[in-house]
Amino acid sequence: MCGISGYYSFHKSISSTNILEMNQALRHRGPDDEGFWMYDHGEGVSFSGNDSTLKIKEQFPVLQEGVSNIALGFRRLSIIDLSEKGHQPMLSENEQIIITFNGEIYNFKKLRNELETSGHAFRSISDTEVILKAYEEWGTAAFEKLDGMFAICIVDLISQKLILARDRVGMKPLFYYQREEGLVWASEIKALLKNEWVKPEINWDGVYTNFLFQTTLAPQTCFQHIFSLEPASFMTIDLKNQQITKEKFWKLPPPSAKKISEEEAVRTIDELLSESISEQLYADVPVAVMMSGGIDSTLIASKSKSFSANVNTYTISYPFSEEEVRNASLAARHFGVSHEIKKVSDEEALEQLKENIQHFEEPYSSFEVLINAAKYAHDKDFKVVLSGNGADELFAGYSHTLKLNRWLLMRNFNFISPFIFTKDKFSQRVKNYFSQDYMFDFFRQSQISMMPLEAKNVIQPDIYSKINPDLSEYHLSETKNYSAYFEYDMKYSLSSHHVFRDDLSAMKYSVEFRYPYLSNRLIDYVSALPENIRFNGIQNKPLLRKTAEKYLPESVLNMPKKGFSFPVNYFIKNERKVSDFITGNLESLKKRNFFNAAVIDKWWNHQEHEYDWVKIWQLVTFELWYQKYFEK
């Protein structure tokens, strides 16, 4: 687990100050080591950095002021093969193929055995070298074989190509800036902004989708000319003519027509989850399991005991989470693992509120409890934490999925929408509901964000006129069943939102989150199951509940779905500090003339619905984002 950065200048050599500053911006992702590789006029040279280990500095000179056409930067968080043999950028034996890699490959031992059988010899026990050899053996076909999370850059001097790749569901982020000067890439946007070519500009199309979905839909970001490489894809840049191509190396399998019993599905899921947990527990550093008190993470903790005698678990406690904490403690006692509770006080939650929000590189609609979870793991010397994230998307866990069948019926009456003329809040909500023609619209409505009309009203007309509100480019297969909703959940709820936020939260404190529910084989298997087994429209996560029955206490199994997040509405209403924080930032925002001040005041002074605070918080976090990335 690390951070990567780099640039390729199409026309002229540029200063190494760029890669030094980009790499420094990622220091929190990898404090254990750093390295560089510079290429100019047909010659590549490896360098160490100021934060490199002593042995690496003895092996490579420290990078000073210089110039290059291509530069690779790397920050290391040592998880597997803690020795200097795992140092990056890593070069092939003939020094013609160079790799930087952020992530973990859980099946690297199996791939290594396969490659050794084909005649490859290894100098380290790292998964990075396995990827390097896999690319030498299979080319870009290697990406589909990798089971894990990854963002990869490969420079292939033999075929004169530069390749960027990202894992199947986007667990590891990879952003890039593309203009006529060249290409810049990094694990976080913060690093891109350190490059001399990159000047921050607002991408209002990205802001618009952010307001509607609580996250910016990939490949867009909230910055002009900065994109997110889409999951399960790789981008190839020809070093001879700078031509850029993009390809997908995997897509979700469609549901199979093959008949299968629920019992067989439960048995197979149990086996695949066990396999995934056993692989993901492997590390050369301490590992913990984060339990929220719900089925997803508690099941992982329960099954982990079979593979590790000393399983460490912990739960983050915050206002109104008493039931979850109680269930987590009960479950830990039930299957006999060590368990600690970290209580996050109101003061602690607010302590670094501004800094934490600005860390996310785009407006955000919540307090991020996972930052507190990562900090606690870091303080307890846990570099690796297993998470239950991904189970909700994979197993139909969100409560709004239970409204799907009703919506499929009600959409037949969408013709009444143009005939709703009243302007009161209830009428507008009804009009919005009957304007959901596509599964994409139903998915948007479920995200509890601004409605399209609300976004249009709050954004100043001269800005809104430049926004493209037609989001049909983000539409997926649009079949009229759960399978279509599942696609949106996996691509936009999981990839663009949850694992992206998870990564930024964890890496702020140099911690690696791992996701046993997101192994290749488990995703492929569940995706291909007949819809009637995966989704019944009555109960969330029916299949996972069945799988968990023999492991978990009844109180955990029957616990209603609840999100793992701070009660922001409670803080707004009860914490003067939060209220003042909001009003101060809203006043600052109104002066920028991006948004309609009268609408902002109306939203702030007339909060009636349970989630009216979300729109306010999106505007506050926009202001904080703007302060951080646009004001010097």
Image (cartoon, rainbow, N blue to C red):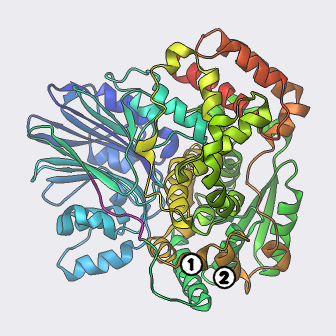
Estimate the spatial distance between the alpha carbons at disc 2 and disc 1, rounded to whole Å: 10 Å
Residue 483 against residue 417 in the figure, above or below: below
* Residue 331 percent across, percent down from the top left: 80, 74
Instruction: Judge by depth and name the residue closer to the eye, 420 or 42.
Output: 420
Residue 75 against residue 253 in the figure, above or below: above
SS state under label 2: helix
Instruction: Judge by depth and name the residue closer to the eye, 65 or 491.
Output: 491
Query: Which residues, given as a range, are shown in magenta?
Result: 247-253
Residue 399 against residue 453 in the figure, above or below: below
The quarter of the picture where residue 303 lies is: bottom right
Instruction: Judge by depth and name the residue closer to the eye, 193 or 484.
Output: 484
Per the image, is 524 magenta? Answer: no
Residue marked by disc 1: 273
Give the overall secondary structure of the magenta segment.
loop
Residue marked by disc 2: 547
Which of pointers 2 and 1 lies earlier in the amino acid sequence? 1
